[in-house]
């Protein structure tokens, strides 16, 4: 049996940066909190937890005083920084530079155009941490578009500027663009910015090639990862024998019936060590 790990899978630079910052701080021995899961992978969260990283939610953050808190790659809205200043919280900002740029761009457009009635649309998942951070740049005025159905909330007689959450699929974003172009009135203007991160977008075609080259695909990802879901869907499109697993304990012998080759891949939040554990388990048991 051939077993291969996809070289293009694993942490993106935004996640590597956040984890490096956390590990640097933890080496000083002080308590370090992280607002939300540092990465959507419970195994990596547990590993960092064992080194002293404490994950907190926004309610717990609001109660904290005089502490050090790491902001993960997804970024945060301005209120988080305001609260930190008020409560003497030291922020270790690990917001991914790509997300930070996008936040700034949205804020600039909002500050310049909102008074003129321009509607800001964000193609993304409602409630996702990154989307909350983006909407926060617009005093919560941006309209989140999850699918074409949500375009019913938009006034097509007024100007529209569209952005995307960094981890969305380009073809879905372009579907939204074309629907807006079809519906917008002749008197209104429409601008859109493809703000999808290429660390993610470039993985889509690559993972399709990888998945098509193996009889069975084990896609290793936390169930909360939206990037994981998008990449797993790409695998399924070209290889029906693709299985989404959190770790090696979810491998079933029936996955491999008649298979000659197994490909192991994962999301931008999947640690390499976890894919290697899956590889070892396949080699030992199949
Ligand atoms: S996927 Fe892109 S934007 Fe998101 S954390 Fe990784 S590098 Fe940054």
Image (spheres, rainbow, N blue to C red):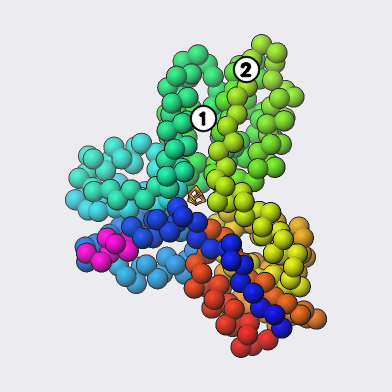
Which range of residues does the magenta coloring cover?
22-28
Q: Which residue is mark 1?
A: 142
Helix, strand or loop for disc 2: loop
Residue 101 lies in magenta, yes or no? no
Helix, strand or loop for disc 1: loop
Residue at the spot 76% in from the left edge and 73% down from the top edge: 215
Left or right, 20 with reference to 270? left
Q: Which residue is mark 2?
A: 189
Main secondary structure along the magenta-highlighted residues: helix
Q: Where residue 123 sits in the image (x, y, percent)?
A: 59, 37
Is 32 located above or below residue 179 in the figure?
A: below
Residue at the spot 50% in from the left edge and 56% down from the top edge: 12
Mark 2, other Cα within 10 Å: few <14 / some 14–19 / many ≥20: some
Of labels 1 and 2, the one closer to you: 2
Residue at the spot 74% in from the left edge and 24% down from the top edge: 182
Q: Is residue 26 visible?
A: yes
Q: Farthest residue in the top direction?
A: 187
Q: Farthest residue in the right direction?
A: 258
The mark that comes first in sequence, 1 or 2, is 1
Q: Where residue 88 sits in the image (x, y, percent)?
A: 20, 45
Q: Is residue 126 visible?
A: no
Q: Quadrant of the N terminus?
A: bottom right
Quadrant of the image occupied by residue 97? top left
Left or right, 46 with reference to 188? left
Find residue 227 and name its label: none
Mark 1, other Cα within 10 Å: few <14 / some 14–19 / many ≥20: many
Quadrant of the image occupied by residue 222? bottom right
Left or right, 24 with reference to 164? left
Q: Where residue 81 sits in the image (x, y, percent)?
A: 31, 40
Is 4 located above or below residue 58 in the figure?
A: below
Closer to the camera in the image, 28 or 144: 28
Is 89 located above or below residue 1 in the figure?
A: above
């Amino acid at each position: 049996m051939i077993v291969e790990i996809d070289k293009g899978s694993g942490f993106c630079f935004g996640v590597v940066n956040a984890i490096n910052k956390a590990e640097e701080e933890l080496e000083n021995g002080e308590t370090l909190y992280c607002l939300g899961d540092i990465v959507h992978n419970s195994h990596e969260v547990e590993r960092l937890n064992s080194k002293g990283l404490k994950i907190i939610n926004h309610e717990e953050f609001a109660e904290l005083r005089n502490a050090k808190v790491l902001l993960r790659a997804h970024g945060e809205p301005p209120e988080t920084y305001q609260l930190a200043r008020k409560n003497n919280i030291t922020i270790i900002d690990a917001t991914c530079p790509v997300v930070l740029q996008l936040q700034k761009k949205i804020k600039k457009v909002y500050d310049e155009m909102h008074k003129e009635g321009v509607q800001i649309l964000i193609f993304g998942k409602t409630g996702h941490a990154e989307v909350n951070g983006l909407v926060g740049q617009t005093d919560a005025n941006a309209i989140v578009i999850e699918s074409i159905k949500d375009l019913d909330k938009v006034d097509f007689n007024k100007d529209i500027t569209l952005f995307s959450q960094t981890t969305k699929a380009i073809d879905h974003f372009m579907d939204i663009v074309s629907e807006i172009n079809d519906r917008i009135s002749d008197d209104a203007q429409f601008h859109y910015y493809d703000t999808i991160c290429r660390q993610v977008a470039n993985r889509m075609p690559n993972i399709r090639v990888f998945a098509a080259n193996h009889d069975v695909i084990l896609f290793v990802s936390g169930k909360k990862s939206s990037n994981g879901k998008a990449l797993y869907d790409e695998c399924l499109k070209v290889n029906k024998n693709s299985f989404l697993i959190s770790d090696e304990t979810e491998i079933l012998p029936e996955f491999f019936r008649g298979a000659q080759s197994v490909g192991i891949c994962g999301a931008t939040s999947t640690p390499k060590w976890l894919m290697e554990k899956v590889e070892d388990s396949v080699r030992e048991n199949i």
